[in-house]
Amino acid sequence: MSIHHVRVIHGSEPNRTDDRRIGMVLRFCATDVRQTKADGDRAILVKGRDTHRHFEMIPRPREDLGPAERRLARAHGLTRHKALMEDATAPRSRRDSAARNLPSSSRR
């Protein structure tokens, strides 16, 4: 298991086995947190009530890998990509400023 910032570059050795390498991402935040990089981000409410409504709530799937579920997953993936990659195309001074705000263990 590894725990790291979302923008840390993967540094593991190649998987030379016949078995797949599995990754799982869990991001937790309070309901008052707001996405500032992209519109239309989605979330699953784990506990309590969301009185801020900063995220679109992900509905319970009706079926495994159904057409509606695949469309939602694709839309969510595009939103996450935009949110994560926006700073990568920002002017260097803005990227440097953002990097200074990362924990020191994330800067390599």
Image (cartoon, rainbow, N blue to C red):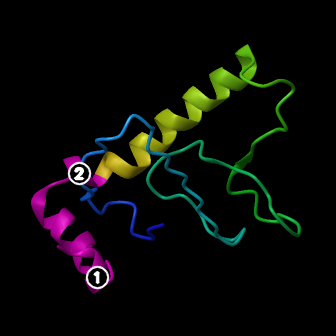
Q: Which residue in the protein does label 1 denote?
A: 105
Percent position (x, y) of residue 83? 43, 49
Q: Is residue 15 magenta?
A: no
Magenta stretch in the rendered image: 87-108
Q: Which residue in the protein does label 2 denote?
A: 88
Q: Nearer the viewer, residue 73 or 64?
A: 64
Q: Nearer the viewer, residue 14 or 5?
A: 14
Amino acid on which the number 2 mark rests in the picture:
Ala
Name the residue at 57% across, 37% down.
76
The answer to which image quadrant residue 35 occupies is bottom right
For marks 2 and 1, give the one nearer the viewer: 1
Label 2 Cα neighbours within 10 Å, binned few <14 / some 14-19 / many ≥20: few
80 left or right, relative to 43? left
53 left or right, relative to 81? right
Q: The residue tagged with tag 2: helix, strand or loop?
A: helix
- Considering every residue shown, the one lying at the far top of the view is 67
Q: Main secondary structure of the magenta part?
A: helix
Label 1 Cα neighbours within 10 Å, binned few <14 / some 14-19 / many ≥20: few
Image height of 47 relative to 69, above or below: below
Q: The residue tagged with tag 1: helix, strand or loop?
A: helix
Q: Earlier in the sequence, mark 2 or mark 1?
A: 2
Percent position (x, y) of residue 88? 23, 51
